[in-house]
Amino acid sequence: MSAPFRLRYTGHLGLRAPDQPLFRHSARSADPVDQIAFLAEQGFAGVQDNFLKLRPVAEQERIGVALARYGLQMGSFNNNPLAWNRPLWSLADPAAHAELARDLEESIAAAARTGGRYLTCVTGMGPRQGDPAEDAARHAAELQGMIENLRRLADRAAEGGGILCVEPVAAAWIPGLLVATLADALHVVHTVAHPAVKLMFDIAHVQTSEGDVLSRLRACWSDVALLQAADTPGRRDLGSGELDWPAILRFVREQAYAGLIEIEHLPAADSAEAEHQLLRRLRAVDAAL
């Protein structure tokens, strides 16, 4: 077994599909339990899974048992995996309210089975008309709709032990999402003003859309629930791109951050060697703290 990292990194059980985990070639198999065992052997602290809620209940329970067995923590999962690109969070009609409430109850149940608590909330925008003033007004109205829906559900999330995480996703990576900038995400979090609604800070998304990521992370640190990490440009192995990871991670360590840093990218190639290279780079970055 490898020595633990200095910070608490996670691997993923599937970033783009539930059968494509981070270490598909290196672990015994792509099965979540084998992936968890491999992550534990490599010194990781946890695992995240965008598709947790799409897995059968029995498989969620297997994941929870395996995490407990190996002493790993469940990281984030998508609260609305079938509606992440729809303008669901910004809608005000009773059907949307019912769907959001049902999604949250399902998330609370999945979190209980796996020991998780971080529920990622992503939403697509409604259609734009092409007129800048009209589109800006609609964007503001949709943000307000998301704020009202988060307010409506925040108490229930807290009762269930969950944190609703608002993540700014760079338009260059996934166009057409409502919350594409850090400013919009912080506006939502600050306006809701509830301890169960926090910021998911994805380092690569913020760097891609706005740059100067370390200064931005410093400025909003008190709002951060969880960190996600990939190098830029693109989304690539830590240490293979333009970002100063020792500086970023030293800042994180200096804050006595005990949370997870989710490795949120794919290996450079679909091979065991690329997975091993990812590990070597991550260990080098972590050792430089």
Image: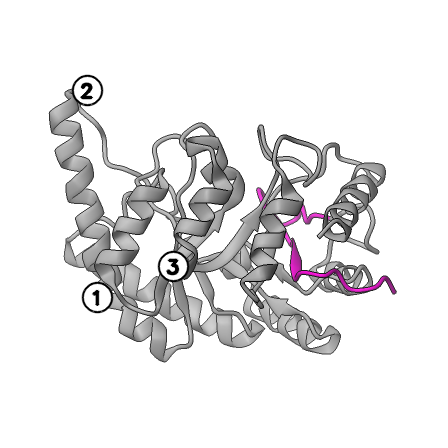
What percent of the width, then of the height, locates residue 61?
Answer: 61, 73
Which residue lies at the image location 29% right of the left edge and 44% below the top edge?
A: 184
Helix, strand or loop at label 3? It is helix
- Residue at the spot 50% in from the left edge and 76% down from the top edge: 112
| First in residue order: circle 3 vs circle 2 | 2
**97 shown above or below 232:** below
The amino acid sitting under disc 1 is: Arg
Q: CA distance from mark 2 to mark 1?
A: 31 Å
> Residue at position x 21%, y 66% from top?
152
SS at badge 1: helix
Residue that badge 2 annotates:
130
Q: What's the mark number on residue 152?
A: 1
| Residue interval drawn in magenta | 1-22
Q: Is residue 178 visible?
A: yes
| Mark closer to the chain start, 2 or 1 | 2
Q: CA distance from mark 3 to mark 2?
A: 33 Å
Horizontal side of 61 relative to 25 (left or right) equals left
Q: Is residue 86 visible?
A: no
Locate the N terminus by quadrant: bottom right
Q: Of the residues under marks 3 and 1, which one precedes in the sequence?
A: 1
Q: Is residue 179 left or right of residue 39?
A: left
Question: Where is 271 relative to 38, above or below?
Answer: above
> What percent of the width, then of the height, locates residue 77?
50, 58
Q: Of the residues tagged 3 and 1, which is closer to the observer?
A: 3
> Amino acid type of disc 2?
Gly
Callout 1 crowding tier (Cα within 10 Å): few <14, some 14–19, many ≥20: some
Examine the image and state in which quarter residue 31 appears.
bottom right
Which residue has dot 3 on it? 223
